[in-house]
Amino acid sequence: MFYIYDKNTLKFEKVKWLALTLKLSLIAVVIFSAFGLTIRTQAKDLNEAEIIVIMNKHDKFSSDKLAAMIKDMNFGFPYIVYAQAILETNNFQSKIFNENNNLFGMKRAVTRINKARGTQSEHAFYRNWMESLDDYSLYSATYLSSLKTENDYFDYLEQNYAEDKQYVKKLKEVIATRKLKEKFN
């Protein structure tokens, strides 16, 4: 037996489980029914082609969407990540970005968890640009999460990330000219 304290009578009274259970069940049915009707009403009028158009619109790249997602993902130095995307994709115009949805010039990883679908033109390819960002996030969690300062981050990138000896210098130029620190603060 379970009891509940009644503040009005200052006594413990038996809990009437059947009545309580029925009330809660009725409330749950009403809520789920209303929610289900809302979903069905919105989705039933769409055909497959319209759903594909909506999904493509959602997946369509924009630099603003990228910036927002980078902010949401809590990178230690989001302005550096964004600058890398700009530099690696030649301002989102490169063949690797357009054909492989690859924002960061990533090769297919073999020693860490990754989101790549395979390799094309010697670079990882992804179903969409968001998978590329997710993959960079996995890369960052694996190799960059212990770096505490901006200089540590740049040092790591210079030694381990890019083949271009001027890579960090170019990143710093992109950050300065586009005022990316301000954009991400």
Image (spheres, helix red, strand yellow):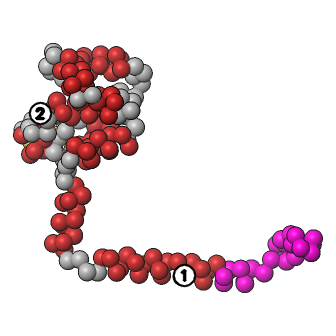
Q: CA distance from mark 1 to mark 2?
A: 54 Å
Looking at the figure, which quarter contains the C terminus?
top left
Q: How busy is the neighbourhood of tag 2: few (under 14 within 10 Å), some, or many (20 plus)?
A: some
- Which residue is rendered at x = 21% and y = 34% of the image? 85
Locate residue 4 relative to residue 106 in the image: left or right: right
Residue 12 seen by the camera: no
Span colored in magenta:
1-23
Q: Earlier in the sequence, mark 1 or mark 2?
A: 1
- Which residue is rendered at x = 52% and y = 77% of the image? 31
Q: Is residue 120 magenta?
A: no
Looking at the figure, which quarter contains the N terminus?
bottom right
Residue 101 percent location from the top left of the image: 16, 45
- Residue annotated with mark 2: 90
Q: Are marks 1 and 2 in contact (CB under 8 Å)?
A: no
Locate residue 69 relative to residue 14 in the image: left or right: left
Residue 23 percent location from the top left of the image: 66, 82
- Which residue is rendered at x = 18% and y = 72% of the image? 50
- Residue annotated with mark 1: 29
Q: Amino acid at mark 1?
A: Val
Residue 43 seen by the camera: yes
Residue 18 percent location from the top left of the image: 72, 83
Q: Amino acid at mark 2?
A: Asn
| For residue 1, above or below residue 180 | below
Label 1, secondary structure: give it. helix
Outermost residue toward the right? 10
Locate residue 88 relative to residue 11 in the image: left or right: left
Tell me the quarter of the picture where residue 135 sits: top left
Q: Which mark identifies residue 65?
A: none
